[in-house]
Image (tube, rainbow, N blue to C red):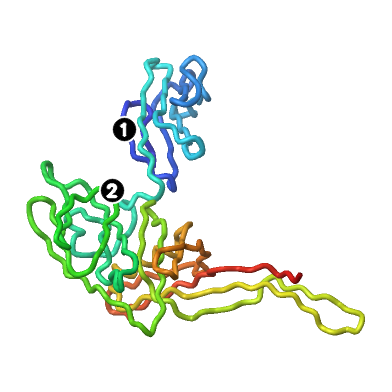
């Protein structure tokens, strides 16, 4: 994102994007911009001084500094305006969803960009709870977003909602908008995992997936050569599984496929008591063009690995 460094303002910066400050139409021969922050430097001793290009414009790449030190205020002063401008930063650890292509769903037009998926496994058998992401733009002045369901009404705070099954109602404080959810119970003949991951916006999502296609692979094997030419091979091991969901809409597929792009994915096979951080090996997913597809999502992960050693 690009922000003017010639005005005092408050800015929300999403850390996976670039942060570029710009000053326009300063005198090329004399133009400069001093930069410092609430953590380092001062106006008399700035972190760095930038000079205008031949067109009188100054561009400042602030990305690496902000990511490394997480300052809350950036200061800029130029030769035309020695009184510094202050940019107050609100840093979000992810990507701004307002710039992401999100498949259509019921509440798009109301400004709710990310809502819980329609199909999800409820916290059946008393095991664990699903935690969904909710991200909405500000509603009309005087209104707020509320979730109604499970016998309670709560204002939406932060970007997470705990799902407990059944149906819930989303309201902006004025008009009710109801969705019925296809909550699904466990099949006792199948294995399930509670998957917790950091979404592309930086929020935490946690949902149940079916576990299929268990794999055991040889890793880092090496051989020894004894005198009698027998085979002595020492093998490491890597265990993998596939996380599966089906009966998904196009939006639900997009929502759950976010696991593949997450830098932190954890899997629990004991209902949320212990989690293992895993490696997602699925490198890309293709979002369906319509709801007319098989509704199936599979994501491959390496669950655990063991060294090649013999004592």
Q: Which residue is drawn at 32% across and 59% down?
A: 101
100 over 77 or under it: above or below: below
- Determine the image quadrant of residue 37: top left
Quarter holding the N terminus is top left
Q: Do the residues labelled 1 and 2 touch (CB within 8 Å)?
A: no
How far apart are the alpha carbons under marks 1 and 2?
Answer: 19 Å
- SS at mark 1? strand
213 over 289 or under it: above or below: below
Residue at far left of view: 174
- SS at mark 2? loop
- Determine the image quadrant of residue 100: bottom left
| Disc 2: which residue | 158
309 relative position to 157: left or right: right
211 over 205 or under it: above or below: below
Q: Residues within 10 Å of mark 2 (few under 14, many from 20)?
A: few
Residue 183: % across, % down: 24, 73
| Disc 1: which residue | 10
Q: How crowded is mark 1: few (under 14 residues within 10 Å), some or many (20 or more)?
A: few
Q: Residue at x 39, y 68 (%)?
A: 271
Q: Which residue is drawn at 13% across and 55% down?
A: 171
**Residue nearest the observer in this picture, 115 or 285:** 115
Q: Which residue is drawn at 41% across and 78% down?
A: 191
Which one is closest to the eye, mark 1 or mark 2?
A: 2
Residue 43: % across, % down: 46, 17
């Amino acid at each position: 994102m690009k922000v003017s460094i010639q005005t005092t303002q408050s800015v929300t910066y999403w850390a996976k994007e670039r942060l570029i400050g710009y000053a326009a139409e300063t005198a090329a021969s004399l133009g400069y911009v001093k930069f410092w922050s609430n953590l380092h430097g001062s106006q008399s001793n700035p972190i760095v001084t930038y000079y205008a290009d031949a067109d009188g414009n100054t561009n400042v790449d602030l990305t690496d500094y902000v990511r490394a030190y997480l300052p809350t205020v950036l200061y800029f002063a130029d030769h035309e305006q020695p009184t510094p401008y202050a940019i107050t930063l609100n840093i979000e650890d992810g990507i701004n969803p307002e710039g992401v292509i999100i498949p259509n769903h019921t509440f798009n037009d109301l400004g709710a960009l990310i809502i819980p998926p329609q199909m999800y496994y409820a916290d059946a058998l008393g095991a664990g709870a699903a935690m969904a992401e909710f991200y909405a733009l500000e509603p009309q002045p005087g209104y707020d977003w509320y979730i109604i369901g499970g016998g309670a009404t709560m204002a939406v705070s932060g970007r997470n909602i705990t799902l407990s099954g059944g149906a819930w109602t989303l309201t902006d404080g004025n008009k009710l908008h109801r969705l019925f959810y296809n909550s699904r119970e466990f099949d006792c003949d199948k294995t399930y995992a509670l998957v917790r991951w950091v979404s592309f916006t930086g929020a935490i999502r946690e949902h149940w997936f079916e576990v299929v296609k268990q794999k055991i692979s040889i890793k880092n094997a090496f051989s020894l050569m004894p005198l009698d030419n027998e085979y002595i091979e020492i093998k490491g091991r890597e265990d993998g599984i596939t996380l599966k969901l089906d009966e998904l809409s196009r939006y639900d597929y997009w929502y759950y496929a976010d696991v593949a792009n997450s830098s932190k994915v954890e899997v629990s096979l004991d209902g949320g008591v212990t989690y293992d951080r895993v490696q997602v090996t699925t490198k890309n997913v293709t979002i369906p063009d319509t709801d007319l597809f098989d509704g199936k999502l599979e994501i491959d992960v390496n669950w655990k690995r063991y060294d090649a050693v013999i004592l």
